[in-house]
Each structure stands twice: as C-alpha cells, then as structure tokens.
Amino acid sequence: MKSAKLSVFVVALASVTASCAVPKSGEFVEVNPNSIPFDLNSPETTIPATTIPYAVQTTIAGAAYEQADFYFIKSAGMVRVRLEIPSPTDPQAVFAALIAGLPDPAHTRVTTLLPTNFSATVEVDGGVANVNAKRGYLDLVKPSEQRLAIAQIVLTLTSQPGIGQVTFSVAGKPIGVPRGRGDIAGAGIPVTFDDYKMLVTS
C-alpha cells in the first residue's frame, strides 16, 4: 500500500511539474493537508504519520531528480520531510543534502542540529553505513542536543534503500553514540531506525 501511494504521489507530482512554470526563486511551499488527494496523508504502518506536507524542492528544468526522505527537528522531536535531490542518489549525496538543510532557511518551524561545516564520508558495506568524520561529531553539538543530532543522521540514512544499520567513526576509529532512549551504543556497535523511532513525533 505504501508503494502504491508513493507511485500515485510521484505521478501527480510529475503532472503538476509539467503543467506549471518552475520558479527560479527556490521557494519551498507548504501544502494544505486537506488538499492532498487519495488519502495520501493517512497514517502509515511502519512509522508514525510524521511527513510534513511540504511541496518538494524547486528543481532546475531538464535536470534529473529523485525523492528521498530526510529527518529534521520540530519541537524537540523528529519529523520526516521528503525532498528531491539530484539523481542518481547515493548515501553520500543524501548525507550532504541532510547537512545542507532545508531549501528554505526562513522556514523556522523545522530546523537541523547539524552544522553546515560538518563533513563525513559515508560508505555502505552489507547494509551497514559507516559515517566517518575527520573530527568529533558531538564536539559541534550541545550535550542536550546530541541525541537528536545523531538521530537525524541515523533516521535519514536508514530510510534509504539498502541501509539497515549505521556505525560512526572519527578518522577511521569507531566511536559510541547516544541512542534515542538516552543510553550509549558502544564504539563500533551499529544503531538502527528502531533505536530512534521513539523520537519521531506524530
């Protein structure tokens, strides 16, 4: 059912894009949930109904884009936002788009805890994505916000095809990270979507 809904959404989006001029301002437009057809905004069975009904990012005519799910912060919780990013998508491109944040920085209701100067290499092996940074992740984030910052990365990466777990390292050395419940996953121990899903608001 989820796949069928997404297919309908993509077809509808393609029709709208073809019939309307693409603005050059890069504006991000909120869509009224009551105007979404075919019950596309109904709750899903795998995670709470957290998708904020934003229109996808304005794109450049003639370029190829794909949809991907990202997680951002709203009212001390996590919300899913579906955006379009350049095709073909891969874990590194998804991570870079997450760090870049929402296309409309003026949208104050949804924020990120990940600084734009934070960089890391994402490599996937056997369904496990390792996020390897040159400097400590948590050095850039307030202690009270570290759990949400790691949740943004884990929830976003494990929402991509072929990734079920995430590990973290700094300069190639495995590190531990806080889970959603507040406990710490030991160095090199993979974390999953389920470790942070309790932070996703409904």
Image: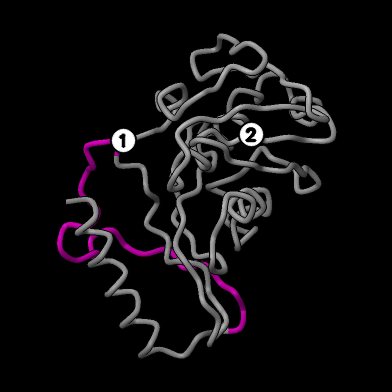
Write the start and end of the magenta stretch as one range: 24-48
According to the picture, the residue beneath numbered tag 1 turns out to be 47
Question: First in sequence: mark 2 or mark 1?
Answer: 1
Quarter-of-image position of residue 14: bottom left
Instruction: Mark 1: give few (<14), some (14-19) or many (20+) Cα within 10 Å.
Output: some
Q: Is residue 176 above or below residue 96?
A: above
Looking at the picture, how far across and down is residue 71, in whole percent? 50, 43
Q: Amino acid at mark 1?
A: Ile
Quarter-of-image position of residue 103: bottom right
Q: Amino acid at mark 2?
A: Asn
Residue at 40% across, 51% down = 52
Q: Disc number at residue 3? A: none
Looking at the picture, how far across and down is residue 98, in whole percent? 61, 49
Instruction: Please give left or right for residue 55 compared with residue 47 in the image.
Output: right
Q: Which quadrant is the C terminus positioned in? A: top left
Residue at 38% across, 88% down = 18
Secondary structure character of the magenta stretch overall: loop
Image colouring: one colour
According to the picture, the residue beneath numbered tag 2 turns out to be 130
Give the structural element (helix, strand or loop) at label 1.
loop
Disc 2 versus disc 1: nearer the observer: 2
Instruction: Mark 2: give few (<14), some (14-19) or many (20+) Cα within 10 Å.
Output: many
Residues at marks 2 and 1, CA–CA distance in whole angstroms? 24 Å
Instruction: Please give left or right for residue 132 compared with residue 104 in the image.
Output: right
